[in-house]
């Protein structure tokens, strides 16, 4: 039997597919794409390996139709990372590969750029000599152009002769010219420092030295630096070292907001091609960025979550900025993965250091520091001689509150504005108000598809569901009793309105998902604050990320209480991170900052600990709690989730799945239970949680159990997924 190719295909089946090498031409290398027959379809797959034989009978083995890559699109390390992810997330490797490659490549686009070129045939040269095209002046002109050089690229022709395509077609029909494709060889790229950075402060220099000494081997570093302490400067210096050694760097950043600013700093510092990959790219742009990375043309690759799979030849350093950020976790769709965790695995495979930077490292990373697996590097001073802000709790029970803002906060805003400062008001809810209430009968506007209320969007005159996107006109009267309705509670839109009424003449900017529809919108808002035109910024989570407004001296956090009493064990961690991050926006310049946190529970131990001892004190207490309750990082979790048209249907599959599990050793099964918000977009959600003290126990169990779960008849009646290391529990 000839050698068999083991091919990953983008199907939900947990296996590779066997094919024979192509009938003609050389066999594909591991990591190359092939086109294969699959039932009545033709699919693009990835060669993951070869084997001496197949379980299939020889007569059923088919040869691949076409080898798409002479050079594999995945090198050995990339193939290993995909295999690791498939095993760890218990996911079909073909679907993992589909996450790793841009769509255009999955559909067969060439992995290297090709250019359309035109050249003259011998007959064409003869036609030119005899002036056979004299009655077609445009063809004649094109013949002349083609005769000037050996080949002409489409781009070059476009520049010389407008509307050249019609005459080109005519020349081809007459046999005078041929069209071809050339592989565009990337121009060799240089890497130079454009503008040197500032002299490092001692802590920065120590951090750079520590990671710098680890270049060339694996090491995981948590760069724990307060906001404004110069973490980015540390990344820049490390990248400088990497470039000087001829290596390349991969920088991962959270989903929104940060990218343009961070990319700007890298472009300012280095005179070298940078490939940028984020979710806002079109398929074609994504392909171009991928090719820049693949060819090695780009020396620096900066991207969000899925860029953890980007090809980076001579990878020498991985940085994960804001490593605690939830957007590194893909928690919907096919493969649910943590880009931060995969970054560490990738660094390990590649034998390079990985730097996890944050002002508020995740409890997982801090636990890894405590266990000696990661090294913590601290930056405790603000680099540009700015003072860390002072945090104060504002007791909502004893203060007069109007439109969600307590009087002492209003007074503080007034004072900071008078002293020419800027103010940030943070509220983690967009829209005008979270509830529309009938004052007559008590009716509350519900979403028809979800167990949720509709949010009032006053400006747009709409009621919207923030869970399923349902959208309806805002009624003036109660649809049940006809009485007047009113908006209850606050969102960014209403806070903006209230502040405008309180501070007439003061320019206010707002930053939330309703305002920011494209990248340009975000930059416009940031620009208004940076120029000083806007004095107050009202915003959601979006404002916590990366922006640096030197004149911002006051931050008001309006609703800290949301995270205090959640059923999700991670809620306190997220709340503490949000408070610290948003507080870090204050006092980035020469003047000290002030932070006011409104709460109805100012004695809550989480808040008092956070204020008294900072994030470190909080993290220590939170880790102790997690240890006692046996939550991660002291246990490993996986969630089997599903959704169905009925609540019973959703539970039925999970009940059967649980029954299949019998009584596994060292693994606890919790549930199944309906999700906290069971109905979303018309479907009922439920979850079965698996927990173990030991990672290997959990994974051994999943290995045996999932194939059986997959075979359940009830599995076909629901949509189900497995989430290993889930970030959010419901
Ligand atoms: P972080 O990423 O930790 O929030 P940045 O790297 O953005 O911090 O630095 C905060 C500010 O301090 C930036 O304006 C940066 O240019 C400046 N900065 C960083 N390091 C230094 C330094 N060693 N000397 C002077 N200014 C610095
Ligand atoms: Zn009513
Ligand atoms: Zn809804």
Image (cartoon, grey):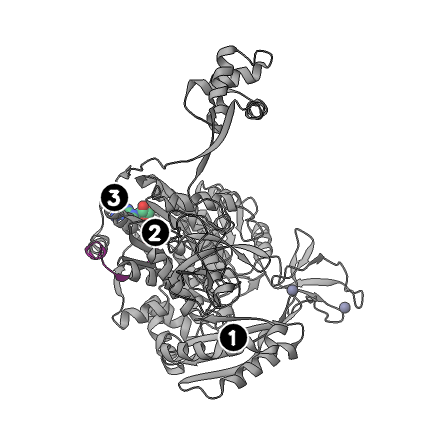
Of the two numbered discs 3 and 2 in the rendering, the one whose residue sits closer to the viewer: 2
Residue that badge 3 annotates: 198
Of callouts 3 and 1, which one flags the residue occurring earlier in the amino acid sequence? 3
Q: Are marks 3 and 1 in contact (CB under 8 Å)?
A: no
Q: Is residue 248 left or right of residue 512?
A: left
Say if 133 sits above or below 119 in the image: above
Q: Position of residue 727 (x, y in %)?
A: 46, 69
Q: Which residue is mark 1?
A: 640
Q: Which residue is more in the foreground, 687 or 436?
A: 687
> Label 2 to label 1, Cα distance in Å?
32 Å
Q: Quadrant of residue 269?
A: top left
On whether residue 354 falls in the magenta region, the answer is no
- Distance Cα–Cα, label 3 vs label 2: 23 Å
The magenta-colored residue range is 210-227
- Gap in Å between the C-alphas at discs 3 and 1? 50 Å
Position in image of residue 406 (x %, y %): 52, 62
Q: Given the current orientation, which residue lies at the most extreme right position?
A: 482
Q: Is residue 226 magenta?
A: yes
Please tell me which of labels 3 and 2 falls first in the chain.
Answer: 3
Residue assigned mark 2? 250
In this rendering, does residue 654 appear at all? yes
**x and y percentages locating residue 710 in the rendered image:** 54, 75
Q: Nearer the viewer, residue 496 or 210?
A: 210
Question: Residue 487: x percent and y percent?
Answer: 67, 62
The secondary element bearing badge 2 is classed as: strand
Picture residue at 56% right of the left edge, 62% below the top: 404
- Residue 267: name its quadrant: top left
Q: Residues within 10 Å of mark 3 (few under 14, many from 20)?
A: few
Q: Residue at x 44, y 69 (%)?
A: 89
Q: Is mark 3 within 8 Å of ligand 1?
A: yes
């Amino acid at each position: 039997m000839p050698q068999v190719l083991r091919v990953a295909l983008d199907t939900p089946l947990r296996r590779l597919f066997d094919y024979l090498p192509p009938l003609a031409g050389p066999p594909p290398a591991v990591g190359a794409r092939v086109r294969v027959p699959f039932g009545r379809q033709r699919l693009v797959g990835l060669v993951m390996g070869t084997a001496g034989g197949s379980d299939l009978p020889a007569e059923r083995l088919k040869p691949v139709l076409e080898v798409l890559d002479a050079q594999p699109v995945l090198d050995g390390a990339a193939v290993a990372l995909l295999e690791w992810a498939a095993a760890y997330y218990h996911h079909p490797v073909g679907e993992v590969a589909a996450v790793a490659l841009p769509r255009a490549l999955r559909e067969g686009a060439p992995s290297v750029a090709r250019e359309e070129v035109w050249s003259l045939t011998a007959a064409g040269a003869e036609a030119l000599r005899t002036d056979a095209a004299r009655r077609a002046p445009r063809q004649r002109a094109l013949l002349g152009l083609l005769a000037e050089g050996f080949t002409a690229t489409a781009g070059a022709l476009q520049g010389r002769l407008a509307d050249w395509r019609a005459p080109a077609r005519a020349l081809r029909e007459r046999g005078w010219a041929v069209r071809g494709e050339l592989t565009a060889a990337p121009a060799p790229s240089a890497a130079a420092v454009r503008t040197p950075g500032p002299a490092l402060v001692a802590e920065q220099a120590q951090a750079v030295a520590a990671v710098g000494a680890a270049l060339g081997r694996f090491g995981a570093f948590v760069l724990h630096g307060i906001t404004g302490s110069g973490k980015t400067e540390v990344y820049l210096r490390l990248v400088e070292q990497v470039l000087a050694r001829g290596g390349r760097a991969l920088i991962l950043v959270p989903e929104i907001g940060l990218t343009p600013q961070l990319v700007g700093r890298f472009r300012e510092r280095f005179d070298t091609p940078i490939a940028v990959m984020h979710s806002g790219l079109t398929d074609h742009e994504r392909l171009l960025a991928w090719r820049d990375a693949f060819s090695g043309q780009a020396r620096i690759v900066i991207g969000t979550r899925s860029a953890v799979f980007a090809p980076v030849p001579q990878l020498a350093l991985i940085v994960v900025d804001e490593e605690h950020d939830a957007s590194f976790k893909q928690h919907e769709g096919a493969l649910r993965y943590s880009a931060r965790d995969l970054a560490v695995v990738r660094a390990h495979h590649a034998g390079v250091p990985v730097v996890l930077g944050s002002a508020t490292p995740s409890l997982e990373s801090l636990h890894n520091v405590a266990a000696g697996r990661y090294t913590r590097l601290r930056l405790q001073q603000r680099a540009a001689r700015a003072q860390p802000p002072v945090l104060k709790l504002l007791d909502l029970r004893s203060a007069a509150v109007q439109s969600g803002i307590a009087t002492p906060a209003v007074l503080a805003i007034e004072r900071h504005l008078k002293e020419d400062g800027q103010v940030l008001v943070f509220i983690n809810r967009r829209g005008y108000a979270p509830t529309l209430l009938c004052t007559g009968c008590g009716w509350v506007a519900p979403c028809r598809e979800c167990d949720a209320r509709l949010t009032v969007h006053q400006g747009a005159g709409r009621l919207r569901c923030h869970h399923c996107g349902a959208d309806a006109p805002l009624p003036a009267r109660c649809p049940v009793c006809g009485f007047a309705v009113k908006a209850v509670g606050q969102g960014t839109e209403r806070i903006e309105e209230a502040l405008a009424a309180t501070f007439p003449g003061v320019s206010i900017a707002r930053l939330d998902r309703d305002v920011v529809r494209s990248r340009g919108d975000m930059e416009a808002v940031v620009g208004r604050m940076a120029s000083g035109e806007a004095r107050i910024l009202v915003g959601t989570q979006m404002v916590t990320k990366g922006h640096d407004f030197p004149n911002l001296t006051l931050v008001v956090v309006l609703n800290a209480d949301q995270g205090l009493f959640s059923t999700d064990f991670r809620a306190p961690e997220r709340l503490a991170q949000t408070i610290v991050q948003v507080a870090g926006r204050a006092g980035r310049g020469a003047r000290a900052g002030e932070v006011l946190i409104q709460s109805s529970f100012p004695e809550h131990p989480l808040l008092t600990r956070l204020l008294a001892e900072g994030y470190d004190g909080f993290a220590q207490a939170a880790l102790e709690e997690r240890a006692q309750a046996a939550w991660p990082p002291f246990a490993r979790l996986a969630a089997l989730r599903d959704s169905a048209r009925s609540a019973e249907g959703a539970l039925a599959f999970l009940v059967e799945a649980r029954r299949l599990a019998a009584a596994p050793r060292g693994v606890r099964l919790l549930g199944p239970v309906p999700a906290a918000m069971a109905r979303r977009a018309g479907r009922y959600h439920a979850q079965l949680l698996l927990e173990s003290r030991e990672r290997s126990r959990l994974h051994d169990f999943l290995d045996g159990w999932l194939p059986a779960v997959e075979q359940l008849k009830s599995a076909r009646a629901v949509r189900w997924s497995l989430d290993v290391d889930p970030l959010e529990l419901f």
